[in-house]
């Protein structure tokens, strides 16, 4: 671990700050805590005037939430880990590029996972090594919110997203995860040429398409057959052509 990683803690409950500090002292003794703040305004001042590597932030605080606080610093340079008792803000945390979302009561494994992920990103920044693809809309990992926190998956491993009632099934090469967030929310997160919503119930990773039937059906790598809506078929051919070469192919829509 880098010996010079610095952090601050913002939480309106002093007991919660003390507990987190004790956990960090045990799990990451080289982590330097520069400040602990129970008032969001004082923490905001520090974030605006000092350079830190890592911010531990509560969500529910008087006057402003942790989400509100981050929106006041749109270009925040430090890594952010939310420590909260509220699971319903996980998607907002993802949109703000939080590196971790740990639910109270704090689990040592979840905390260690989040901090180690933050350390990896900090190391890459300090070494001037990019941590994401050159396309800013195509991150290497995606966060899948669930009631206990966020599961981070390699985005390349995701085959497709399927709407299941009000939930979303995220299907990977080896397993699937059910998220309480709807398909529209995931469409915002994976908005890139690699993913396309081909049907009201499906968003597919174009890199994992095995076959396209001109009748309007996709065969995915797990042999799942996914319908392509008529009004999307021309767009599918256009977008897919950007990541592949199809010799002599002519879609029915252009005939």
Image: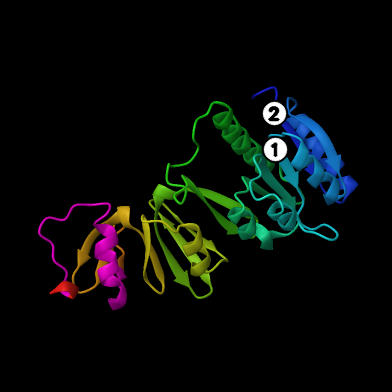
Which residue does the image show at 83% across and 50% down from the upper left? Answer: 40
Residue 225 picture location, percent across and down: 29, 67
- Above-or-below relation of 129 to 238: above
Residue 61 picture location, percent across and down: 82, 57
**Which label is found at residue 54?**
1
**Is the residue under label 2 in contact with that under label 1 (CB below 8 Å)?**
yes
- The stretch of residues the image draws in magenta is 226-252
Q: Earlier in the sequence, mark 1 or mark 2?
A: 2
Residue marked by disc 2: 5
Residue 179 magenta-highlighted: no
As drawn, the residue found furthest toward the right would be 14
Residue 234 magenta-highlighted: yes
Q: In the visual, does 170 lie left or right of 75?
A: left
- Above-or-below relation of 197 to 13: below
In the rendered image, the quadrant that contains the C terminus is bottom left
Which residue does the image show at 62% across and 37% down from the upper left? Answer: 118
Residue 169 picture location, percent across and down: 47, 64
Q: Nearer the viewer, residue 193 or 223?
A: 193
Residue 221 seen in the figure: no
**Which label is found at residue 167?**
none
* Secondary structure type for disc 1: strand
Q: Which of the 4 image quadrants contains residue 223?
A: bottom left
């Amino acid at each position: 671990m880098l010996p010079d990683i610095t952090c601050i803690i913002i939480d309106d409950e002093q007991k919660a700050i003390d507990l987190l500090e004790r956990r960090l002292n045990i799990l990451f003794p080289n982590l330097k805590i520069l400040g602990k703040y129970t008032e969001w305004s004082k923490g905001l001042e520090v974030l605006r005037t000092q350079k830190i590597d890592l911010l531990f932030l509560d969500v529910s605080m008087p006057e402003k939430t942790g989400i509100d606080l981050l929106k006041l610093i749109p270009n925040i340079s430090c890594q952010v880990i939310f420590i909260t008792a509220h699971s319903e803000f996980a998607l907002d945390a993802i949109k703000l590029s939080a590196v971790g979302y740990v639910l109270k009561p704090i689990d040592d494994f979840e905390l260690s996972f989040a901090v180690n992920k933050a350390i990896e990103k900090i190391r890459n920044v300090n070494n001037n090594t990019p941590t994401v693809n050159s396309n800013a809309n195509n991150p290497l990992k995606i966060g899948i919110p669930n009631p206990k926190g966020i599961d981070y998956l390699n985005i390349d491993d995701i085959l497709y997203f399927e709407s299941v009632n009000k939930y979303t099934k995220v299907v990977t090469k080896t397993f699937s995860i059910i998220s309480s967030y709807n398909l529209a929310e995931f469409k915002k997160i994976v908005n890139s040429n690699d993913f396309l919503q081909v049907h009201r119930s499906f968003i597919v990773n174009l890199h994992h398409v095995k076959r396209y039937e001109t009748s309007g059906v996709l065969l995915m790598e797990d042999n799942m057959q996914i319908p392509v809506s008529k009004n999307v078929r021309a767009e599918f051919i256009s977008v897919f052509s950007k990541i592949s070469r199809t010799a002599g192919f002519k879609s029915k829509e252009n005939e």
